Image (spheres, rainbow, N blue to C red):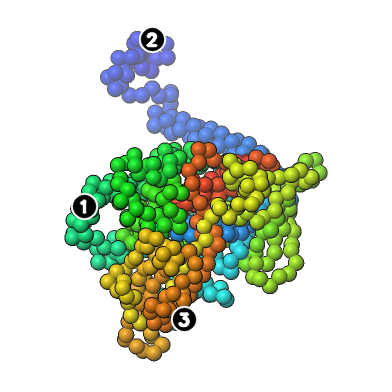
Amino acid sequence: MAPSHLNPAASATERAPLLRNLSPPIGLPGRPWSTSVLTFAARIFAALSVLWLLVDYWDWTQLPLNPLPTYSVAIIGMHYLGQNPALGFIFLFWDEPSNFLQGAGPAGISAAQHLRNSPATRYVHFNITIYESKPVLGGALAFHDVNGSSVFPKDDPMQIPIAAEDVAGTALVWNSALFTQDSEKVLRDKIEFIELGPKQIGYKTPMSTWVQLLWTYGNSVWRGNKLAQDGALQKAIVKVPLVPDVAKIFKSLGVLRPLRQRANDMLRGRSISERYTTDILEPQVQRAYGQGLNKVTGLTAMMAVAQEEFANAYQGENLIQRLRRIVHEIDVEVRTSTRVTGIKYVEIGEKHPAWLIRHESADGGGGNSSIEMFDGVIIAALDFDILLENGEKSVPNLVNYYDIDADAAQAAVREDDYYVPVHITFFTSDAKLSPWDDDEEVLFLEPQKAAGMRELTLVREVFNYQDNSTKAEYLYHVLSIRSVLEVLRSRANITWSYQTKIEKAYPVLSPLQRFPPFKMPWAKGFWWTSIIQRAGTSVDLNWLAGKVAAQGLINEVS
């Protein structure tokens, strides 16, 4: 009689002890057990392969008969300053007709790279075109001369060109953790940051100064330091989900409450003295956002203090150069010196939505406008001059939509209240400025009484290589509410200067209890990243807004 483990008629009770005693596995008559196992595995593999092919075939059958549907994207830029260089317009183009994307600063480029690289676009190809009103890419802090070339101190190409970091601090990229993370994925590299020593940081606080601060302001010094820590959002922002809701975004960041508070109310709640607020925090907020503490949110104050704390503590990479490398890497067409003037929603055929986009040259040379048709729109700029139309229906302009609490008449008249301009001046002097020769950075308490200056900062020493001179000169930058070059000439021997005005440098950041959504409600396919400017502004917040809008458009297309 055959052993029970080879007897098909053996009961389960008879076979069970053999399994527990690790008996040889059951084989088939005339075939080694190892061959049976391999055959069984091969059949499983074949079955899984067939299943995979069926799933993949079904996936492809959901696509149009043509190859991957193609969407063209155009990006056109308007600009902000400080920690928030230029945004722009983002529009997507389909094959027939197309979609439209505007913006060549962080928000626009962020949207473009997300449309190109997101896993959600596996079966969609985007033809992306960047539209930028400036002659160069990169945003408000992409400094350039009248020919669109880089700006060099002393007009000497041997010098280090003026960069965004010369205004916002050497840690501009380090402060932008989300941008850093995404840019490393796109460019397939790793940024090496250098932590600067105390003598290399622009604003130094020696021990004697700390003692003086504690004597003057007491515990407010320590509480102010905690304010800076709470305003540093680098760790939280890389985890924020791409939800098209401003309140949910800032709730995820853990700062929704200070966003809805006035700065002065928040500071009183933290037991920070009025004297410390006036002497220390007020000029820091003025420097970072061009507005007084009595006008901004608690979150704005927190972010301004964090900017002051970390602006020059690290060094690594150049923001504008990195943005331009991303544009090159994702292979997009670039159209600079182009301004969008009008957007009109129409329906073609059987209620097929389309957008007519009117644009013209922005180089001041005049010329005729051009009109193109697209399927979707993402605006990534705080540009209230664009005319919106919706067939025969009246459409609230961008000001009405930006401030949902303002009535139409008020918004139309007071749109300038939604942004703050700034003058930026760079100059070289053959000597340090008196009476500030011992100070590398001066923040003015009362800009109106300081010839309109908010900040005066020594950037670096420069040498005149053209004359082979070994004598150092000093490169300064000034942020001001009006042009101050003539005032500076009366105080110093200025050997070279460069100045520019950014009309929409900083969005006004007053407290709000509710925010408009990123998606325009009156027509399909219209998104606006600048809604996030109602709450806060930085490179990372603008970068996040671009991704949110792009993801929203991807969801609509899908």
Q: How much space separates mark 2 and mark 3, taking CA atoms?
A: 96 Å
Quarter of the image for residue 490 reads bottom left
Work out whether residue 34 or residue 314 is closer to the camera in this orientation and state it: 314
What residue is shown at x 39% (from left), y 14% (from top)? 7
Residue 236 visible, this angle:
no
Quarter of the image for residue 365 reads bottom right
Residue under label 3: 155
Work out whether residue 42 or residue 241 is closer to the camera in this orientation and state it: 241
Amino acid type shown at disc 1:
Leu
The dot on residue 11 is: 2
State the image coordinates of residue 102 (x, y, percent, origin top left): 61, 56
What residue is shown at x 35% (from left), y 9% (from top)? 13
| Lower sequence index among marks 1 and 3 | 3
Q: Is residue 309 left or right of residue 36?
A: left
Q: Residues within 10 Å of mark 3 (few under 14, many from 20)?
A: some
| Lower sequence index among marks 1 and 2 | 2
What residue is shown at x 61% (from left), y 59% (from top)? 76
For marks 2 and 3, give the one nearer the viewer: 3
What residue is shown at x 45% (from left), y 66% (from top)? 452
For marks 1 and 3, give the one nearer the viewer: 1
Q: Quadrant of the C terminus?
A: top right
Q: How much space separates mark 1 and mark 2, taking CA atoms?
A: 87 Å
Work out whether residue 291 or residue 176 is closer to the camera in this orientation and state it: 291
Q: Residues within 10 Å of mark 1 (few under 14, many from 20)?
A: few
Q: Quadrant of the N terminus?
A: top left
Q: Residues within 10 Å of mark 2 (few under 14, many from 20)?
A: few
State the image coordinates of residue 498 (x, y, percent, origin top left): 48, 75
Q: SS for tag 2?
A: loop
State the image coordinates of residue 169 (x, y, percent, origin top left): 38, 63
Q: Is residue 361 left or right of residue 430?
A: right
